[in-house]
């Protein structure tokens, strides 16, 4: 959760790194296009800015600007098909592709998680808690008040409806079950543990 300006800057930096635009001088590199044109990056910047202003600048003086930011955020959410509430995702969020991403306001998503398109994280009154360094494959559905461990990879179209608190595993299927384990030196789904 962003509580001060340093947190805000750290969150932006980690989100930028997660999207692959991590050089110190992006104008000199070819990844400048990510920073200038990527709609996911623009959405994430607006998300973090709104979180910062809502959490840190909540006095009556700033309320009109916060309303303006909220209006821009909702408009951008509708255009991209991404529904992510404030203060749900930790730093290092990577929205790989926009389109039909729905996350409940009760969910908690850890650091450096990658979310593909078609992901749905929901529940009635409470939702999932997802650990750090997780990969949520295209179309996966996570519901009920469950816990997912750290460095868990969830395959495409998997339906996760029970807790998997164990770390370093791969989940797939309907309903999801453990299909593989990840060692320290082993790459699964093209993603290495950070």
Image (tube, rainbow, N blue to C red):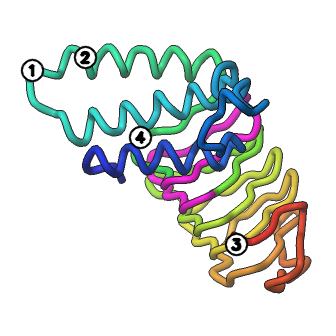
Image depth: mark 4 or mark 3 in front:
3
In this view, 58 is above or below 106: above
Mark 4 or 1 closer to N-term? Answer: 1
Residue with the mark numbered 3: 151
**Residues in magenta, as a range:** 90-112
Residue with the mark numbered 4: 86
SS label for mark 1: helix
Mark 4 or 3 closer to N-term? Answer: 4
Crowding around mark 2 (Cα neighbors within 10 Å: few <14, some 14 to 19, many 20+) is some
Crowding around mark 4 (Cα neighbors within 10 Å: few <14, some 14 to 19, many 20+) is some
Which mark, residue 65? 2
Q: Marks 4/1: CA distance?
A: 21 Å
**Magenta stretch: helix, strand or loop mostly:** loop
Seen at 56% across and 27% down, the residue is 43
SS label for mark 4: loop
Residue with the mark numbered 1: 61
Mark 2 or 4 closer to N-term? Answer: 2
Q: Marks 4/3: CA distance?
A: 23 Å
Return the residue found at the far left.
Answer: 60
Asked where in the image residue 113 lies, by quadrant, the reply is bottom right
Mark 1 or 3 closer to N-term? Answer: 1
**Quarter placement of the C terminus:** bottom right
């Amino acid at each position: 959760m962003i509580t001060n300006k340093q947190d805000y800057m750290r969150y932006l930096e980690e989100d930028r790194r997660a999207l692959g635009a991590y050089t110190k001088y992006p104008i000199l590199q070819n990844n400048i296009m990510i920073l200038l044109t990527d709609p996911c990056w623009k959405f994430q910047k607006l998300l973090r800015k709104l979180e910062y202003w809502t959490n840190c600048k909540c006095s009556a003086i700033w309320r009109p600007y916060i309303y303006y930011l909220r209006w821009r955020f909702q408009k951008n959410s509708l255009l991209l098909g991404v529904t992510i509430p404030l203060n749900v995702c930790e730093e290092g969020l990577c929205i790989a592709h926009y389109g039909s991403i729905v996350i409940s306001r009760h969910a908690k998503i850890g650091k450096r998680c990658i979310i593909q398109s078609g992901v749905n994280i929901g529940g009635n009154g409470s939702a999932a808690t997802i650990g750090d360094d997780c990969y949520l494959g295209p179309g996966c559905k996570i519901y009920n008040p469950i816990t997912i461990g750290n460095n868990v990879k969830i395959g495409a179209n998997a339906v996760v409806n029970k807790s998997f608190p164990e770390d370093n595993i791969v989940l797939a299927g309907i309903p999801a079950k453990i299909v593989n384990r990840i060692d320290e030196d082993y790459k699964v789904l093209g993603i290495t543990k950070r």
